[in-house]
C-alpha cells in the first residue's frame, strides 16, 4: 500500500508542478507557433540533445496523461521533419502510454477487480482472448481519448508487451497524419483543422481493419483445420445430433422447429440418463421413501405412527412405471412427428461432414451434414478399487434394473460418494429400511456447498439412520466366503465395513470414446474441448450437455442445446456465446438444498466482497403449519446494494422456491423488487419476501427514521 501511495503522490506532484510552472502554455498551438523559431535554433545548435529532451518530454506528458500530446506531435513534424518526427513520436507515445498503463495496473487493478470482478468476468474473458484486436481498433480511431485507453487497459488482463506493440502499431497511422501536418505548421489555424471530415472517415475505415483481420484470421484457421478433408459437394442433412438425452433432444427439436433437415442418432434408450437412470427414477424413489418416512412419523401431524410394511419389488415397479409414463415425451414417435429423423444405432464421425451409423437392427448408413452436435452424455465413474469386481457393485445407472428383482431393500448398503447423487440414494434407502453407510473421502458431504449446509445435510442423513463416514478413503474390497467387506482408511487407521450391496456414486465422466474424436484430432480433456460458442476444433462440430461440461445438470444440457443448435444452423450469420451466469441446482434430500450463483465459500475463494442476509424458515407461518419449520434462505448481495450475487435455500421444496430468485438474478431484479412483489399467504414462497425484508431492515435510513420519530411526536403535541 505504501508503494502505491508513493507512486500516486509522485504523479500528483509532477502534474501540479507542470501547471505551477506554467508549462502548459507551451503545449498549445499558439505557444508552439510563437516558440517555433527558438526551438529551431536550439535544434540547430544541439540536435541530439534537443531530440532527447523532446523524446523525454513526450514520454512524460503521455505517461502523466497531460493535455498537449497532439501539439507535441505537430511540433515533432515542425522541428524534425516527417521521418524523424514520426520515429520520435511513435516510440515516445508508446512508451509513455505503457508507463500510464503499468501505473494504472499497479495502483488500481486489484481494487477494481476485487470490487467489480463478477461484473467484469465477461469483459476479462473477452480481453484475455481478443484484447489485442480491441486495443488496435481503439488506437486507430482518434475519437477515443488515448489517455483513457491507457488507464482502462491497465485494469483488464492484457499483457504489457502486447499493449506496447499493439499501441505502437495502432497509433502509427494517426502519428504520421499529425507529424505531416506539423511540417505545415504555419498554415494550421486550429487542431480541428487537422481532422477534416474526410480524414475522420479514413480513420473510421481504418477502425474496421481489426474486424476484417479477425474474420480473415478465422478464415485462415478454418482453412488450415479443414485442409486434409474433402468437403462434400452437397449435404444430406443440415444437422446430425449424436445422443438423445436432454441436450440431443432439445438440439433436434430446435432444428426441426426451424424446418432444418435433422437426424437424431441414439444407440440405447431415448431420453438418455435423466429419464432412464437419473432424474426421473431417483425422484420416484425419493417420493416413495419420503412417504414411508412420513408414515413412521405421523405423530408429528397428530396421527398415529405406523410400522411401514411394503414390497420393495412394488416400490421399484413404481419407479419403472413412472419412467414409462414419462417416456412418450422423449419417444421416437413424438420426435418423428415433429419432423426429426430418428435412427437407433451407434454414430461415428468419419470426417467433419460425414457421420457413419451402425444401425442396431443391422447395416450401416452414412449421412453428410453441414453441422454435427455431439450430445453423448456421461456415464458413472467407477473407481479403480482393488477387489471391487470380486464383491460386485451397482451404479446410479445399473441399480434400477438390478434392484428391481429384489423382494427387500438391501439389508446392509454401502454408498461410495458424498455428492448429491450419493446423498439422495443414501437417505432414500435408509428410509426404506436399509442400514446405510456412506463413505466420502473429502472431509464433508456436499463439498461445493457452504460448511453449514453440509453440516445440515449430514445431520438430516444421520437422523434417518445413515452412518456418514466423511474423511474416509476407500482403499480396497475384500471377500471372505459370502461375506463382502469394504476397507476404508482415515486418520484413525483402517476400518472394515460389511455390506450386501455397494453403490458407486463418486461422479460421472463424459462419454468420449468411440465417436471418432481421436481420428479427427478433436481435443478432449475431461470433456470435449469447446469454445464459448460450444464449437470444437471444427466450427461445424459442436458439443452440448454432460459431454461438454462444465455442469452436469439436465437443465444446463437443455440450455446449452439452444446455443449448440442455433450456432450449428445459423453460426455463419451470427453466433451466440453460451451463458452460464445464472445456473441453479438442487440436491433432493430432505430438507432440499438449492443454490444459484455464489455461496459464501465461493465468495471467499474468489475474493468477492458481499453482504450476507439470512432468514430462518423456522419463523415462517406455512412452514410451521406443515411441521417443516427448518432450514433458511441465505442471500449474498453487493455491499450496500440489493443486487443478488447468489442464493442458498435449505428447506421443504427449496428447489421450487429458488425459481423466483433465479428469475430475479437473470433479469437484474434486486431484493427491493422481490420485497415489493405480493406473495400469497400462507405459502413457503413468502420466505423469499421475508429475506428481502431482512435486507431492507438492515439498510433502513436510521437518521431519517429518527427525524420521522420526532415529527410524529411533534404531531401528538
Image (cartoon, rainbow, N blue to C red):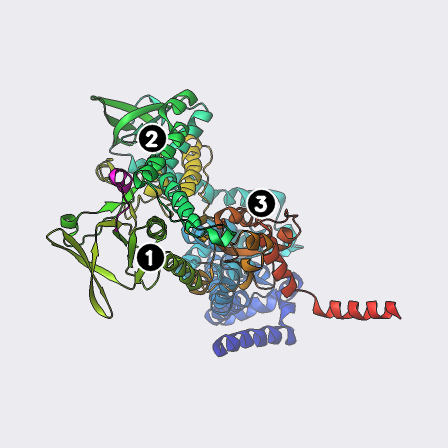
Q: Residues within 10 Å of mark 3 (few under 14, many from 20)?
A: few
**CA–CA distance between discs 3 and 2?**
62 Å
Magenta span of residues: 399-411
Left of 237 or right of it: where is 493?
left
Q: Report the residue at 65% width, 65% height from top.
A: 31
Mark 3 or 2 closer to N-term? 3
Q: Which SS class for mark 1?
A: loop
**Do the numbered discs 3 and 2 sit on residues whose CB atoms are within 8 Å?**
no
Q: Which residue is mark 1?
A: 466
**CA–CA distance between discs 1 and 3?**
77 Å
**CA–CA distance between discs 1 and 2?**
34 Å
Left of 338 or right of it: where is 398?
left
Quadrant of the frame with the C terminus = bottom right
| Residue 75 spot, x, y in % from top left | 56, 61
| Residue 232 spot, x, y in % from top left | 29, 24
Q: Report the residue at 29% width, 54% height from top.
A: 435
Q: Nearer the viewer, residue 466 or 610?
A: 466
Total of numbered circles in the picture?
A: 3
Q: Nearer the viewer, residue 584 or 145?
A: 584
| Residue 351 spot, x, y in % from top left | 26, 31
Q: Nearer the viewer, mark 3 or mark 2?
A: 2
Mark 1 or 2 closer to N-term? 2
Disc on res. 270? 2
Q: Which residue is mark 3?
A: 199
Q: Residues within 10 Å of mark 1 (few under 14, many from 20)?
A: many
Q: Nearer the viewer, residue 145 or 79?
A: 145
Mark 1 or 3 closer to N-term? 3
| Residue 612 spot, x, y in % from top left | 54, 63
Amino acid at each position: 500500500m505504501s508503494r502505491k501511495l508513493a507512486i500516486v503522490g509522485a504523479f500528483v506532484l509532477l502534474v501540479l508542478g507542470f501547471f505551477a510552472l506554467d508549462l502548459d502554455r507551451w503545449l498549445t498551438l499558439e505557444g508552439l507557433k510563437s516558440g517555433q523559431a527558438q526551438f529551431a535554433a536550439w535544434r540547430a545548435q544541439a540536435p541530439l540533445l534537443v531530440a532527447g529532451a523532446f523524446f523525454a518530454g513526450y514520454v512524460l506528458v503521455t505517461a502523466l496523461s497531460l493535455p498537449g500530446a497532439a501539439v507535441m506531435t505537430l511540433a515533432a513534424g515542425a522541428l524534425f521533419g516527417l521521418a524523424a518526427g514520426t520515429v520520435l513520436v511513435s516510440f515516445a507515445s508508446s512508451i509513455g502510454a505503457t508507463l500510464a498503463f503499468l501505473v494504472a495496473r499497479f495502483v488500481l487493478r486489484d481494487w477494481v477487480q476485487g470490487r467489480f470482478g463478477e461484473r467484469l468476468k465477461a469483459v476479462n474473458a473477452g480481453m484475455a482472448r481478443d484484447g489485442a484486436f480491441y486495443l488496435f481498433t481503439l488506437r486507430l480511431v482518434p475519437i477515443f481519448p488515448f489517455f483513457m485507453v491507457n488507464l482502462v487497459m491497465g485494469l483488464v488482463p492484457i499483457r504489457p508487451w502486447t499493449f506496447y506493440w499493439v499501441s505502437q502499431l495502432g497509433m502509427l497511422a494517426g502519428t504520421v497524419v499529425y507529424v505531416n501536418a506539423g511540417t505545415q505548421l504555419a498554415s494550421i489555424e486550429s487542431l480541428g483543422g487537422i481532422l477534416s471530415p474526410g480524414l475522420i472517415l479514413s480513420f473510421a475505415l481504418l477502425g474496421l481493419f481489426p474486424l476484417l483481420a479477425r474474420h480473415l484470421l478465422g478464415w485462415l484457421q478454418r482453412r488450415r483445420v479443414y485442409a486434409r478433408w474433402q468437403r462434400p459437394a452437397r449435404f444430406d442433412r443440415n444437422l446430425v445430433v449424436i445422443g438423445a438425452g436432454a441436450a440431443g433432444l432439445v438440439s433436434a427439436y430446435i432444428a426441426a422447429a426451424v424446418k432444418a433437415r435433422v437426424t437424431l442418432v441414439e444407440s440405447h434408450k431415448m431420453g438418455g440418463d435423466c429419464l432412464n437412470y437419473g432424474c426421473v427414477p431417483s425422484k420416484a424413489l425419493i417420493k416413495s421413501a419420503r412417504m414411508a418416512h412420513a408414515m413412521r412419523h405421523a405423530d408429528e401431524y397428530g396421527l398415529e405412527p405406523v410400522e411401514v410394511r411394503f414390497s420393495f419389488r412394488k416400490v421399484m415397479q413404481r419407479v419403472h412405471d413412472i419412467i414409462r409414463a414419462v417416456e412418450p415425451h422423449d419417444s421416437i414417435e413424438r420426435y418423428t412427428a415433429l419432423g426429426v429423423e430418428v435412427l437407433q444405432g451407434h454414430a461415428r464421425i468419419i470426417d467433419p461432414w460425414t457421420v457413419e451409423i451402425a444401425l442396431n437392427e443391422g447395416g450401416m448408413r452414412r449421412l453428410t451434414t453441414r453441422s454435427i452436435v455431439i450430445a453423448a452424455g456421461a456415464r458413472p465413474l467407477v473407481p479403480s478399487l482393488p477387489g471391487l469386481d470380486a464383491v460386485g457393485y451397482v451404479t446410479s445407472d445399473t441399480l434400477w434394473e438390478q434392484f428391481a428383482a429384489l423382494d427387500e431393500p438391501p439389508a446392509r448398503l454401502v454408498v461410495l460418494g458424498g455428492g448429491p447423487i450419493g446423498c439422495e440414494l443414501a437417505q432414500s434407502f435408509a428410509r426404506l429400511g436399509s442400514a446405510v453407510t456412506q463413505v466420502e473421502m473429502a472431509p464433508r458431504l456436499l463439498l461445493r456447498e457452504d460448511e453449514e449446509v453440509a453440516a445440515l445435510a449430514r445431520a438430516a442423513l444421520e437422523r434417518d439412520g445413515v452412518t456418514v463416514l466423511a474423511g474416509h478413503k476407500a482403499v480396497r474390497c475384500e471377500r471372505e466366503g459370502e461375506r463382502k467387506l469394504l476397507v476404508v482408511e482415515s486418520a484413525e487407521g483402517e476400518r472394515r465395513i460389511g455390506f450386501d450391496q455397494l453403490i458407486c456414486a463418486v461422479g460421472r465422466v463424459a462419454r468420449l470414446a468411440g465417436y471418432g474424436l481421436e481420428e479427427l484430432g478433436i481435443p478432449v480433456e475431461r470433456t470435449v474441448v469447446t469454445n464459448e460458442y460450444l464449437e470444437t476444433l471444427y466450427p461445424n462440430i459442436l458439443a452440448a450437455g454432460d459431454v461438454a461440461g462444465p455442469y452436469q445438470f439436465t437443465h444446463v444440457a437443455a440450455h446449452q442445446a439452444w446455443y449448440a443448435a442455433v450456432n450449428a444452423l445459423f453460426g455463419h450469420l451470427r453466433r451466440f456465446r453460451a451463458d452460464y451466469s445464472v445456473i441453479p441446482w438442487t440436491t433432493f434430500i430432505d430438507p432440499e438444498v438449492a443454490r444459484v450463483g455464489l455461496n459464501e465459500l465461493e465468495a471467499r475463494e474468489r475474493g468477492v466482497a458481499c453482504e450476507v442476509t439470512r432468514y430462518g424458515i423456522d419463523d415462517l407461518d406455512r412452514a410451521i403449519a406443515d411441521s417443516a419449520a427448518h432450514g433458511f434462505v441465505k442471500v449474498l448481495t453487493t455491499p450496500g446494494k440489493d443486487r443478488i450475487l447468489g442464493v442458498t435455500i435449505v428447506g421443504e421444496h427449496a428447489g421450487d422456491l429458488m425459481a423466483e430468485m433465479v428469475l430475479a438474478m437473470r433479469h437484474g431484479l434486486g431484493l427491493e423488487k422481490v420485497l415489493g412483489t405480493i406473495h400469497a399467504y400462507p405459502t413457503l414462497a413468502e420466505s423469499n419476501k421475508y429475506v428481502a425484508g431482512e435486507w431492507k431492515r438492515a439498510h433502513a435510513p436510521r437518521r431519517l427514521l429518527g427525524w420521522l420519530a420526532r415529527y410524529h411526536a411533534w404531531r401528538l403535541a
